[in-house]
Amino acid sequence: MDQISAATEGAPKSVEDLRVILQGDTKVKVAGLSHLLTLLVGVDVDGILRGKYMSKDKFLSAASGGFGFCSVVFGWDMHDTVYTRELSISNRQNGYRDVLAKIDLSTYRRIPWDNNTPFFLVSFFDPVTLEPLHADPRSLLHTTCELAAAQGFSCMAGVEYEYFNFKETPESVAEKRFTHLSPLTPGMHGYSLLRTQLNQDYFNELFDESLKFQIDVEGHHTETGPGVLETALAYTYALRMADNAILYKFLAKSIGMKHQVLPSFMAKPWGDLPGCSGHTHVSLRDPSGRNIFAYSEGSDGRADAAFEDTKFLSFIGEQFLAGVLDGLPEVMPMLVPTINGYKRLVGGESFWAPNGVTYGYDSRAVSIRIISPPSVPPSATRFEVRVPGADMNPYLVLSAIFRLGLRGITQRLKLTTLPISTYLNDPSRKGEVVMLPTSLEDATTKMMRPGSVAREVFGDQFIDHFGGTREHEVKLWNAAVTNWEVERYLELA
């Protein structure tokens, strides 16, 4: 198995394989043209799928060399508004030229709820240099995994999504102006077997269609909050995990439409309720498949561990953790990319969300939870990064975590940050905790400053582009007048 892409079952390895796979697909002539058979999809910086249906003949001709795809998907925001400051990839001066989209044959799937339509993901390349496009999230993670492979590591990951579900449609929420929405179920019912009996067809179809779409689900249950579900995606290679995570959102929204349900992965829909997380689990394996974060040489743990919390982590695991902690505040826009996402963190531990550079053994009150023996077998040792919300782009989140961790290993960083247990045992020391940025504006400024860790691990091209997209988001927010402002100031100011 390719330890970077982790091909789907039945994925073709050549154009000839493609011809065999597609030979049974029925052609339907419409106005003299072949029926559109294949769906090709890329991912923009906001984690939104951008794609097109393509005829079988056109698809086969593009399978080896790629095809032109309008670069505007890297020149506008999630609502197709051109960025305030035009960025280098797509702008008026270059005429919003095409970039090169290359089909990744290893991502082959069929969409079970759409007539079993063949489906492939693409990655984007510069049409002149033929280098991976620096702003393409999928190419960024692929390069990250290659960097790890060059050091003898395979990147492994898992993602858990929490998401509110509403008895709404895109039309109904627009008519209601996104207010007074009806939750799918009432009340706070985390891990409830009773609540899954309501809307049972929708609940079960999310699980069943995921498996047909080659997205393995590890767990699927209700979470606390009206109409909230949580779905944990099965652990696998990082690039495959990001593909599965981005496609699970697509699947949930597609299945929701069939049932008149609108699932929302917005990080903080309600101010007085917990937000929606995108908890991300990571580890590294060596060529033999061994988890290199694990320490299993003795039941008492590693005698030279930095802290009690890390005694069942390997030394290299500590270095990885030190790297993530060191750079975490400077890559926050990659983990929390929206204005709303920071509202989830502001509540801090009272809403099960972290707001500081913290870690600890099996603690859900921290930014990075160590999962290791004695609570799990050594082979399951990993870090759960609890900062991202459900609105995150998994390609960017995983790229950030692994690049920071690899930097920690390469630079042999020592773990000097104290575990959360220290501050809980001695509350007078809580002032020592380094806090995370509390707004997208602050986070973007920190990420884009000269000499930032983000620039060190991602380079100027990506940071300037992605940072420009976040500056656009901040500018729109700063210009907006919210309902809260009107309600607070209209009469009494």
Image (cartoon, rainbow, N blue to C red):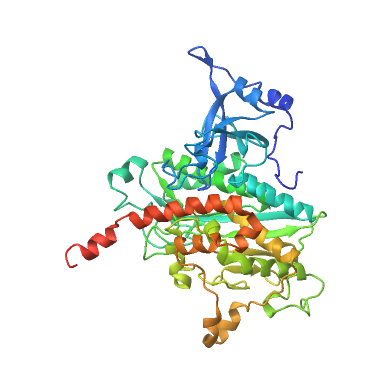
Q: Which image quadrant: the C terminus? A: bottom left
Is residue 392 in view from this perspective?
Answer: no
Using the image as rendered, state which of residue 189 and residue 473 is in the foreground.
473
Using the image as rendered, state which of residue 271 and residue 436 is in the foreground.
436
Residue visible at 45% across and 48% down in the picture = 85
Q: Is residue 41 above or below residue 346?
A: above
Residue visible at 53% across and 36% down in the picture = 71
Q: Is residue 457 above or below residue 300?
A: above
Classify residue 32 as left or right of residue 307: left
| x and y percentages locating residue 410 in the rendered image | 75, 63
Q: How many marks overall?
A: 0
| x and y percentages locating residue 372 in the rendered image | 69, 69
| x and y percentages locating residue 439 in the rendered image | 44, 64
Query: What is the residue that sits farthest to the top in this orientation?
Result: 32
Q: Which image quadrant: the N terminus? A: top right
Query: What is the residue that sits farthest to the front in this orientation?
Result: 93
Using the image as rendered, state which of residue 352 and residue 68 is in the foreground.
68
Residue visible at 38% across and 41% down in the picture = 260
Residue visible at 62% across and 38% down in the picture = 126
Using the image as rendered, state which of residue 78 and residue 344 is in the foreground.
78
Classify residue 478 as left or right of residue 399: left
State the image quarter where residue 411 is shown: bottom right
Classify residue 316 as left or right of residue 370: right
| x and y percentages locating residue 403 in the rendered image | 67, 58
Q: Is residue 183 above or below residue 128?
A: below
Is residue 372 in view from this perspective?
Answer: yes
